[in-house]
Image (cartoon, grey):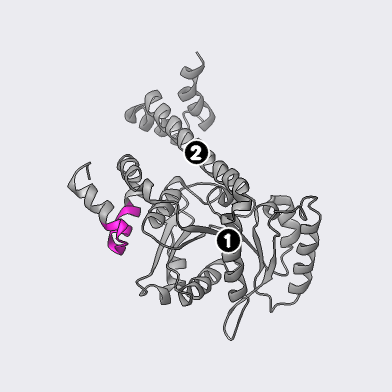
Amino acid sequence: MDDGPLMEKLVEKVLERSKRAIAKAITLVENHPDECELFIKKIFPHTGHALVVGITGPPGSGKSTLVNNLAIEFRKRGKTVGIIAVDPTSPFSGGALLGDRIRMDELSGDPDVFIRSMGSRGSLGGLSRATMDAIRVLDASGFDLVLVETVGAGQSEVEIVRTAHTTIVIGIPGTGDAVQAIKAGILEIADIYVVNKSDRPGAEEIAKELRLLLTLDPHSKDEGRWQVPVIPTTNLPPIISGIQKLADTILKHELFLNDPKNAQFAFEQEKIRRKNEIHEIIKVEIFENMLTSLIGKQEWEKLLQEVISKKTDPYSAARSIMDPLFR
């Protein structure tokens, strides 16, 4: 695709919220970074309207089911919803397991819901550069909310705060999540803490412990500061509870961010997000361009063969690539 009628048509259709065009655009940002840059430039003026909600937590905490139930609740309220489910990337095919889309199958026929699974592409926090651009595509398409479910890789999940306006951290009883949250710095990134599977023994205790930990923050009672709530939820039939309260709280947090009294706080948060995004783009571009200039494809293949045949080791191979930088 070039800077011509095809690109302009894709932009036009994305802005009209054509599902086919949105899917094509996300494939573009995943697989064609050069063309993606031009596309993002064209849609960027149309972004900045969607509320981006990040949902993170350890594997098995019920993120996918929670996202599914949240999307259903927001649809009942007339909100349009885009969903990005970030899955671990296969080290062999480079693709992503589509388990989350299978779980959300009941939403797939809704014209005001768009669901896409994406690979983490090796990003530690599960949020690759392509994921951030995909969020922007859904934003430009006019969705009211974009729900981003992360991989669930434990301590690396703090990366979601660089992208989302509202960050939901999920814990479940019986796994020591409260202690783990302190170790990982997870507690500090949460705008809302959810104790999922709250019908299990120990749920009330972990909720109390989290509320206590939140009060230890010396700034927790500062005027004009968002008070992080702890919301118990249960997401599987026959008991589904806490979803309406969670949806209410997400919208309450949006109102908090949009309140003129909190304009400076919201601006500082947005500045952090944009700064981190620009830093990430610079890091990727420098790495890729530098590697291309340091070693050609044939030399790269030869070096890999030498490592595979044990003629050299990975450290020596890496040094042979980097040495020209320090001469």
Q: Is residue 281 magenta?
A: no
**Relative to 69, residue 296 above or below:** above
Q: In the current view of this chain or complex, which residue is farthest to the front?
A: 260
Identify which residue is drawn at 60% across, 61% down. Answer: 253
**Relative to 156, residue 214 above or below:** below
Q: In the drawing, what numbered circle is on residue 255? A: 1
Q: In the current view of this chain or complex, which residue is farthest to the top?
A: 327
Residue toward you, 60 or 39:
39
Q: Earlier in the sequence, mark 2 or mark 1?
A: 1
**Label 2 residue SS:** helix
Identify which amino acid the numbered label 2 is placed on: Glu
Q: Position of residue 11 (x, y in %)?
A: 28, 52
> Could you tell whether 285 is left or right of 54 in the image?
left
Q: In the current view of this chain or complex, which residue is farthest to the left?
A: 5
Q: In the drawing, what numbered circle is on residue 280? A: 2
Residue toward you, 60 or 161:
161
Residue toward you, 99 or 182:
182
Q: Position of residue 303 (x, y in %)?
A: 41, 29
